[in-house]
Amino acid sequence: MCLSRSECNERMTGKPITIVGGGLAGLTLGIGLRQRGVPVTVWEAGHYPRHRVCGEFISGRGQETLSRLGLRELFERAGAVNARTAAFFSATRSTPPRSLPAPAICLSRFTLDQLFANEFQKLGGELCAGQRWPAGGVHASTGSDRPKPELQPEGVVRATGRHLRPTENGWRWFGLKVHARNVPLTADLEMHVSPRGYVGLCRVNGGAVNICGLFRRRAGMSGSPQNWREWLRGQAGSPLNQRLAAAEFEENSFCAVAGISLRPQHAAARDACCVGDAITMIPPVTGNGMSMAFESAELAIEPLAAWSRGGISWTEASRTAAQRCDAAFARRLMWAKWLQRMMLTPSLQNVLIRLVSHSEWFWRTAFEWTR
Ligand SMILES: Cc1cc2nc3c(=O)[nH]c(=O)nc-3n(C[C@H](O)[C@H](O)[C@H](O)COP(=O)(O)OP(=O)(O)OC[C@H]3O[C@@H](n4cnc5c(N)ncnc54)[C@H](O)[C@@H]3O)c2cc1C
């Protein structure tokens, strides 16, 4: 049962839950637990507001989670932009704008994470920003001499985001993002593919266009990608390069991440209770990572609240949350892996663009199966 905001503030019953990581998964879980009167503390290593590497394009079932948790109206008040069309581009081919089978929501992470942090605190949640939870948590005894580093004590949930992996199958993955003005778009979402990665462009609140790319380079290649403008602008003469010809970048919104791992993982295989990217990361082309953060948090609320009330053990609560997430995400993770593989294979990029252009069935199926 969900409580009103004032009832949440008054009610603090049951065993407390600590959430490590105040990104979207951690804050959504914190909000859902506070709505049920559970005492919650969120530890967040960073501060709010902050820019994040993200396409800022929310697509999928997580939108229903937002409605159920009463968070949808926050987006509207913050000026979120609805995206209804998408177009795909390679260096030589493009699709016409296609209608998205379901609209997406575009809101900058600078605004979004701050909104969620405020909401969590309004509901009586304790937010420890600028506080890093010790790596590996508390080392519990595992019956052997060596403690299991991932094991967390009862009542602690990991919402720490993606797992760092310097290389995957011989590639180093990294992400870049910046906001810009003066970027004309032909669709609400433009996705530009190239052999070294893909870049998504969409309009967000405040009239800026978010430019976000996922790139890869061979491990062992000398030098580091210093010039982010060059990576984001794409090859000379490409549609992306033309689109960004007169772009005015908002330099203070630039951010980068490296060591991204896109190999699908099972929640049930984790030693700790996890939500969001701490379980696994879906290829960003789907625009579904934030949705999975919201969904995984929602799937964990009820078993964790039951643990807090003393109804079930921590092991049972963690296992139930993990099984629910694995059941919800297995299919989309598999299809997203194949879609991303196609997008990054030069000989298949134009095939993909032709299929999206000419086959309504392909477009709808690819959309539905990756969400
Ligand atoms: C290039 C790129 C583009 C993307 N584009 C999209 C998109 O368009 N649409 C979409 O839906 N998704 C997109 N995503 C994915 C999306 O950003 C993530 O899925 C989402 O942010 C996951 O939320 P999270 O809360 O699990 O993790 P995060 O948002 O990463 O939050 C984890 C938090 O944990 C904190 N933390 C970590 N360790 C500790 C510690 N020890 N103590 C305290 N705090 C800690 C971190 O500071 C961080 O704030 C993209 C990702 C990339 C890389």
Image (cartoon, rainbow, N blue to C red):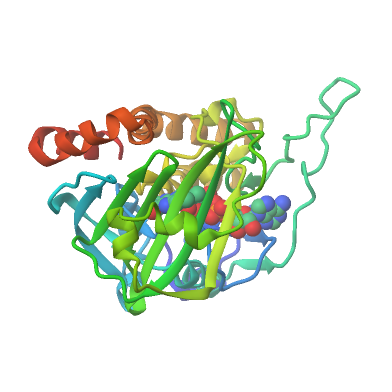
* x and y, in percent, of residue 255 in the image: 56, 63
Does residue 103 sit above or below 117 in this rendering?
Answer: above
Does residue 122 sit above or below 302 in this rendering?
Answer: below
| Closer-to-camera residue (114/339) | 339
Residue 28 showing in the rendered view:
no
Quarter holding the C terminus?
Answer: top left
* x and y, in percent, of residue 17 in the image: 64, 52
Residue 268 showing in the rendered view:
yes
Seen in the image, is 215 located left or right of residue 98? Answer: right
Q: Residue at x 39, y 65 (%)?
A: 210
**Residue farthest to the right, as pictured:** 145
Q: Residue at x 27, y 55 (%)?
A: 239
| Closer-to-camera residue (210/287) | 210
| Closer-to-camera residue (225/341) | 225
* x and y, in percent, of residue 293 in the image: 46, 49
**Residue farthest to the top, as pictured:** 144
Quarter holding the N terminus?
Answer: bottom left
Number of numbered discs overlaid on the protein picture: 0
Q: Residue at x 78, y 34 (%)?
A: 149
Does residue 296 sit above or below 247 in this rendering?
Answer: above
Q: Residue at x 44, y 57 (%)?
A: 232
